[in-house]
Image: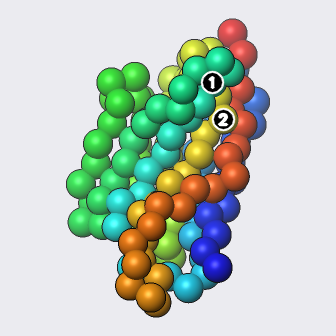
Amino acid sequence: QVQLVESGGGLVQAGGSLTLTCAASGSILIINDMGWYRQAPGKQRELVADIAHNGTTNYADSAKGRFTISRDNAKKTVSLRMNSLKPEDTAVYYCKARLAGRNLLWNDYWGQGTQVTVSS
């Protein structure tokens, strides 16, 4: 059984910072891409940032220059440092990992989500 558990969400004022962390656990052989997505009320889930196993990163335009994604392959964690937060960043943030278990089958796994609320 594979689990992704997010932490670090909360309420912050505009201009503030938060760091989200996601930890993967279970029968995992290797993790490929890890990423953060978000979904605001009434909107579709969207990519915020992702990072490959070799550290190559990709950011949504809305995140460039303000957010930084990083990962620790040994600890099976991915983090998202969010600076200069805006009210429009308010959403539920989800961690996603593409990984293979001991059966060598690749699948996408999602965390349960963590709420980020930015007040103006």
- Tell me the CA gap for discs 2 and 1: 6 Å
Asked whether 20 or 25 is in front, the reply is: 25
Count all numbered tags in the image, as a single digit.
2
The structure residue drawn at horizontal position 51% and vertical position 66%, both measured from the top left corner, is 77
Residue sitting at the far right: 11
Query: Pointer 1: what residue?
Result: 40
Asked whether 40 or 104 is in front, the reply is: 104
15 shown above or below 107: above
Residue 100, quarter of picture: bottom left
Q: Is residue 87 left or right of residue 10?
A: left
Q: Is residue 114 left or right of residue 21?
A: right
The structure residue drawn at horizontal position 34% and vertical position 54%, both measured from the top left corner, is 51
Decide if residue 73 is in sight here. Answer: no
79 shown above or below 36: below
The kind of residue on which mark 2 rests is: Val
Looking at the rendering, in which quadrant would you find the C terminus?
Answer: top right
The structure residue drawn at horizontal position 59% and vertical position 30%, both measured from the top left corner, is 39
Callouts 2 and 1 close, C-beta under 8 Å? yes
Asked whether 108 or 114 is in front, the reply is: 108
Query: Pointer 2: what residue?
Result: 92
Q: Secondary structure at mark 2?
A: strand
The kind of residue on which mark 1 rests is: Ala
* Mark 2 nearby-residue class (10 Å; few <14, some 14–19, many ≥20): some
Residue 94, label in figure? none
Query: What x and y, as percent, mark residue 72?
Result: 43, 69
Q: Secondary structure at mark 1?
A: loop
* Mark 1 nearby-residue class (10 Å; few <14, some 14–19, many ≥20): some
Query: What x and y, as percent, mark residue 22?
Result: 58, 59
Disc with the residue nearer the chain's start (2 vs 1): 1
The structure residue drawn at horizontal position 38% and vertical position 84%, both measured from the top left corner, is 104
Decide if residue 26 is in sight here. Answer: yes
Looking at the rendering, in which quadrant would you find the N terminus?
Answer: bottom right
